[in-house]
Image: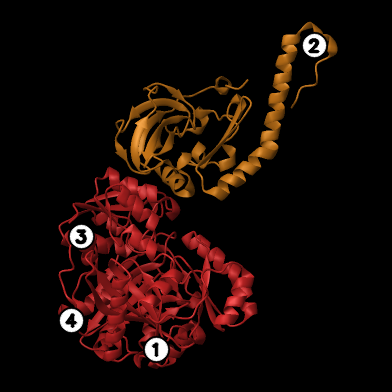
Amino acid sequence: MFKKVLIANRGEIALRILRACRTLGVEAVVAYSEADKGSLPVGLADEAICIGPADARRSYLSAPAVISAALVTGCDAVHPGYGFLSEDEGFAEVVAAHDMTFIGPPASVLERFASKAGTRQLLGAHGLPTIPGSDGMLRDDLHALNEAERIGYPVLVKPSAGGGGKGMRMVRTPRELESVLKVCRSEAKAAFGDDSLYLERWLDENRHVEVQVAVDRYGHGIHLGERDCSVQRRHQKILEEAPTPALSEAARADLADRAVRAVVAAGYENVGTLEFLVDARGAFYFIEINCRIQVEHPVTESLTGIDLVTMQMRIAAGEPLGVTQSEIAFDGHAIEFRINAEDPAHDFRPGAGVVERYHAPGGPGVRMDSHLFSGYEVPPFYDSLLGKLIVWGPDRATAIARSRVALDELLVEGLTTNVEIHQALLASETFLEGRMTTNLLDRVGSAAFLAAAARA
Amino acid sequence: MPEPPPSDARRSERRATARDAAERAADHAAIDRLSADLLPALIAKLGATGLGELEVREGSWRVRLRRPGGSTGTGSSRDRRAGEKGSPDRPGERAPGERSARGHGHHSDSSATVKVDHRSVATSPAVGIFQPRTDLSTGTRVRSGDRLGAVDMLGIAQEVVAPADGIVGASLVEPGDAVEYGQELIVIEFVPVPASTNGSGS
């Protein structure tokens, strides 16, 4: 195991990694930007180092700054968290070149799975059904229009790099496609520094179901079940749960089994997530792989009792998995609510400012992963995630009942949060019956959805 | 403004002086061109690139643009400094374009009137290993923007610069020390400087 890990991230995930390091008895250094000087991970860390100004390009996204910080603090590993440099194979390579370990897949593996189109082809060859999409990256507008015609509208425009819904648009006509290409390119360029786009067929009524896998250096892989992330707003996940209400137990086992067999065969290593779209008939299509720890990993931790971050560190340190598929048990139901600094009354406009009072809910099955504290000033420079409320119950109904109590108890004063949308979801028949699809909130309109919940 | 061309008679009699005048005229023309054409372009460039600093040399003239707060750029370091002392008219508080065309005395501020307290601190522009300039010692007079040393960030030397005119005071870190971004490195003590002594141009 490592002696000292540099945590190259911020917010709740920096705190989560700090806790994992402590669990393993590993020293940790929190790398932070000037804007995060007063943050909880920095305050709780034994050691913290300022790596740059608020601008992420010169701090959390600066490979030289992060690696320099790791070197001068004597770290032997770097944990990138999610976002920022977490799936940057160039970064992983430079970390390794400085005799440190990148906690995630090795650079060669990241490179193999870097292109979304290439990964679909690769995993398709290893038995995963894939969604029809464009032949590689879109060269220009004409290529895009021709490919869209071939795939069939509606199509989803997606950036090759990154995630989180940035640069993504669903279009129903050639005219719409033409009008969004430029926006998507500039969004993708701004968010990921890469403006390549590709197309995917859009399934109107689809669910987003993803499979958590873990593969050690010795080719031993397991899956940790699936998560349903169908509750989305503009392609951003806002609530995740497991198991998925969309598939039978047999179908879930089949999906997870095929996913792990495909990634092991394709040479994946470390923890990762395979995302699928599931159509109304229950057919599933592989769309992409996330080569990192994900925001929603606690859902899986709640069901399996496995600490995914320490598992990720053990794998990166070269340890064998130490657990077989048959030893993984899935217990109960878990739901994660992403608590964002967003104003539902104003089109979910992100906010920033001082958290005047903060209280995290508690009780059986309730877990709050958050970097908030009373008096904390949320800086305006980064994403709006304030924390994650994860609620477990022996069954879905209990998890939902506990979630209602927990959401009511959660107190974040001074900032507007999206708690209202979660409360509306828990009052929505569609959600309660497990029938949410990825575009439902956008189709109905979040405002209409909130208003309907208020009437109910 | 460019001087009028010297008369034929004076040119023949005092060739050397004429040459000086011609050089001066060229310098003045260069300054005009710098302020009229080059500076706006450079300011735009600095704003667009996210670089901390740009320097252009032409003839004996040098133009260096640095973001407020030294080469560390961005509003946050500016805020930090402002927070420390609440003085609105420090060099670091000015717009990027104003820090320019060094080398003319008339362009410099009078330090004595600008500085409210009597010291300022050069901070680290990066996380890495600090090496001060070897010819620097306590008491060395420096100008705002002068290089005091560098922080090696993974082989990339990031300049540490004087945040203000003054003399070098205490070093807060040792050569070869690991430093973090924004860390205080070298104290610059302010000394009242008459504006006329600041000139170093032609």
In the picture of the structure, the residue carrying the numbered disc 3 is A318
In the picture of the structure, the residue carrying the numbered disc 4 is A329
Disc 1, disc 2: CB below 8 Å? no
User: Camera-side residue: A313 or A407?
Assistant: A313
Disc 2, disc 3: CB below 8 Å? no
Q: Residues within 10 Å of mark 1 (few under 14, many from 20)?
A: some
Picture layout, residue A221 above or below residue A32: below
Kindly state the secondary structure of the residue where label 2 is placed: helix
Kindly state the secondary structure of the residue where label 1 is placed: loop
Q: Chain for mark 4? A: A
Q: Colour of chain B?
A: orange
Amino acid on which the number 3 mark rests in the picture:
Gly
In the picture of the structure, the residue carrying the numbered disc 1 is A283
Q: Chain for mark 2? A: B
Amino acid on which the number 1 mark rests in the picture:
Ala
- Report the residue that reaches farthest toward the top: B13
Identify the residue shown where x is 60% and y is 81%.
A149
Q: Is residue A313 visible?
A: yes
Identify the residue shown where x is 36% and y is 42%.
B154
Query: What sort of colour scheme is used for the picture?
Result: by chain
In the picture of the structure, the residue carrying the numbered disc 2 is B11
Kindly state the secondary structure of the residue where label 3 is placed: loop
Residue at mark 4 shares a chain with residue at mark 2:
no
Q: Chain for mark 3? A: A
